[in-house]
Amino acid sequence: MSVVTRFPPSPTGFMHIGNARTALFNYLYARRHGGKFLVRIEDTDRKRHSEEAVQAIIEGLDWMGLEHDGEITSQFARQDHHKEIAEELLAKGQAYYCYCSPEELEQMREAAKESGAKTFYDRRWRDKGPEDAPEGIAPVVRIKAPLDGVTTIKDHVQGEVSVPNDQLDDFIILRSDGTPTYMLSVVVDDYDMGVTHILRGDDHLNNTFRQKVIIDAMGWDLPEYAHLPMILGQDGSKFSKRHGAQGVHDFRDMGYLPEALCNYLLRLGWSHGDDEIISREQAIEWFDLEHIGKSGAKFDYAKLENLNAHYISEGDINHILEYAAPFYKSRHGIELDDLAIERITKGQDELKSRAKTLIQFADESVFYAKSSPLNFDEKAQSLIDDGQEVLKLLLEGFSSMSEINSDSVKDLCQSIADSHMDGKLGKVAMPLRAAITGTTVSPSIFEACAILGAQECCTRLNAALK
Ligand code: GLU
């Protein structure tokens, strides 16, 4: 049997990190088995529906590199077919019309509350026929859930989970306005899409028992299930807004590389021995259901940052620049040109080893992309104000050198330090850094000067001199 997994998000406006992990697991499982990874948008809530919200999910998947197979399915577009299945269930005697009024339902709810029953609907229409139907009332359609016994789901993560059938109600599959309910639509879509494995959050485990009622009534095969424990905040409660960033786009905007976030999400809830760094290829080779963790995993920003630093330091510079480009633009108003890319590429080793995020990478390398005169930040300006004499000597030094390298720049600084600053190299290097980069934080200033070249250094020093 060929594996088919699915990712069926409700478009809420953004891709939640928990959904992102679910998508990743489904993707990996499908790829591991040479199967298909399908995407379905559960867009039946038309009041809140927006195309932007759908787009946010597609962008999130795209950013994470989770390519899906085939067309994206719209659940809403399939509603007529969901209705047909409800009618088929009615015809088979597996479902029935229920004409209860809101008042009757309210009375049943009250009674159930008093008796402590798990379900409230007393199935009063289950065995009645159309001849009993009152006039002028649009009925709902309810499924006939089993009346006794136990329903057991064999879950790849949770193990065997059972629910006594008297806790399953005859839930609604078609509303009185004729629209199918979520419970029906999901089951029908999963069946039609040929889904063999359902990996989803364990908040859906309760739904699974109900969905099985429909699956059994239709005589369809039950898919395999793996219900994933929730992602938790550091305090052990469900990961939510108060724990910080929630959406994939938040992490993107904080300067994380997709491969770092994917690696992090993979390890958050799945393990392969003690391996922490797992490439996409390895993940596809290794991912299985047996090693999904059984309890909720705590979101740890420090770990994510470590992975990000790793992927930045190991990453191909063009790849890093592609993902860092928005930060040069948004934070500094700069589009990288060929010269900037050439300089950053030359200085990449140190830049990459310093950066924990792409924001840091962009901030610490943007001076390569700027042209003189620079805007000096406050601290740099004060170093420049106090270091005019040193800067003049540096300008003289650079003017007399046509070729420079890190060593020759360092030697120049040291000789100025020896003759004017009691040998203190920092007293020369700091104003130099301020004049060359416009800031007080940068990679080695000697190397930076060497990469910029003597002429550019002279231009920048000149601009810093009063
Ligand atoms: N649309 C549901 C959600 O976003 C997913 C349902 C499912 O996985 O069956 O939570």
Image: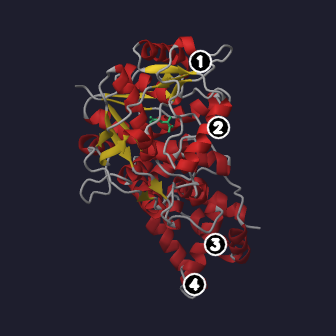
Q: Give the class, few, some or many, for how many residues have Cα within 10 Å of label 1's Cα (few <14, many ≥20).
A: some
Q: Give the number of the mark in front: 3 or 1.
A: 1
- 180 relative to 156, above or below: above
267 or 432: nearer the viewer: 267
Q: Is residue 428 visible?
A: yes
Task: State how far apart marks 4 and 1 are (Cα).
Answer: 90 Å
Q: Which residue is mark 3?
A: 431
Q: In the rendering, at what x and y percent does residue 121 appear?
A: 53, 35
| Cα gap from disc 3 to disc 4, whole angstroms | 16 Å
**Which residue is pictured at 51% across the width and 50% down the height?**
343
Give, as a three-letter code, the residue at label 2. Answer: Glu
Which percent across, then down, holds residue 52?
63, 31
First in sequence, mark 4 or 1: give its number: 1
In front: mark 3 or mark 4? 3
Q: Earlier in the sequence, mark 3 or mark 4?
A: 4
- Tell me the SS state at disc 2: helix
- Marks 4 and 1: which is nearer the front? 1
Q: Considering only order in the chain, which callout, 2 or 1, is on the residue closer to the N terminus?
A: 2
| Circle 4 residues within 10 Å: few <14, some 14–19, many ≥20 | few
User: Of marks 2 and 4, which one's residue comes earlier in the chain?
Assistant: 2
The colour scheme is secondary structure
Question: Which residue lies under the disc numbered 4?
Answer: 419
Farthest-out residue, bottom: 422
Name the residue tied to disc 1: 178
Q: Amino acid at mark 4?
A: Ser
Q: Secondary structure at mark 1?
A: loop
Give the residue pinned by disc 2. Answer: 106
Q: Residues within 10 Å of mark 3 (few under 14, many from 20)?
A: many
